Image: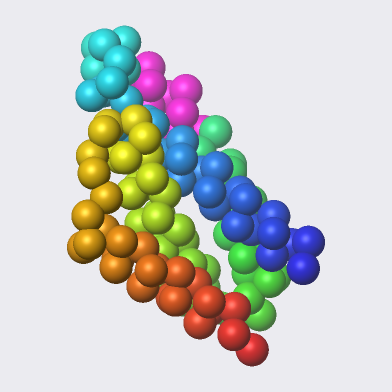
Amino acid sequence: MVKGVAFILFWILGSTLIWIQTNGQFLWESFRDNPVKLSIVFGSIISLIMITATRFGFETLNGSLWSIKWVGFSLGIIINALLNYYLMGEGINMKTTISCVLAGVIITIQFWK
C-alpha cells in the first residue's frame, strides 16, 4: 500500500516537472531563452524521480511494466489537463472531461487484482 502511494506521488511529481520543463517556455521568458540550461537542470532530477516511481510501480503492480506504462500515461493525461487549465487558462470541455474519466478507469483497471 505504501509503495503504491509512493509510486503515484512520485509519478505525479515527475509528470508535473515534465510539464513545467516543456511548457514553461509559454509562461516564462527565462524558460524560453534557456532551453539547454533547463534541460540540464530538470533532466537529471526528473530522471531520478521517474526511475524511483518506476521501481515502486514495479513492486506494487506485480512486476508488470505494462501496468506502469498505462498508469503513467493516464496520470499524465490528468495532470496535463489540470496544469493546462490552471496555468495556461485552457478550458476543460466535455472531450477533456471524458478523457480524464477514461484515464481514471484505466488507472483503476491496472490496480485491479
Q: Quadrant of residue 91?
A: top left
Instruction: Inspect this view and state whether residue 55 appears.
Output: no
Please check the rendered image and state whether residue 26 is part of the magenta-colored stretch, yes or no: no
State yes or no: residue 36 in magenta: yes
Left or right of 90 on screen, residue 51: right
Image location (x, y in percent) of residue 103: 39, 68
Colouring rule applied to residues: rainbow
Residue for point 55% across, 42% down: 13
Report the label total.
0
The location of residue 27, given as percent across then percent down, is 28, 21
Residue at 55% x, 33% y is 45
Q: In this picture, is 32 found above or below 4?
A: above
Check the image and report above or below for 48 versus 93: above
Q: Position of residue 95 (x, y in %)?
A: 21, 63
Q: Name the residue: 23% across, 24% down.
A: 26
Residue displayed at 69% across by 65% down: 4
x, y percent for residue 111:
59, 78
Q: Is residue 94 above or below residue 52?
A: below
User: Relative to residue 60, is residue 15 depicted above or below?
Assistant: above
Quadrant housing the N terminus = bottom right
Query: Bounds of the magenta span?
Result: 34-44
Q: Quadrant of the C terminus?
A: bottom right
Q: Is residue 28 left or right of residue 7?
A: left
Residue 4 appearing in the image: yes
Seen in the image, is 106 located left or right of residue 57? left
Q: Nearer the viewer, residue 85 or 56?
A: 85
The single residue placed furthest to the bottom in the displayed view is 113
Residue toward you, 28 or 42: 28
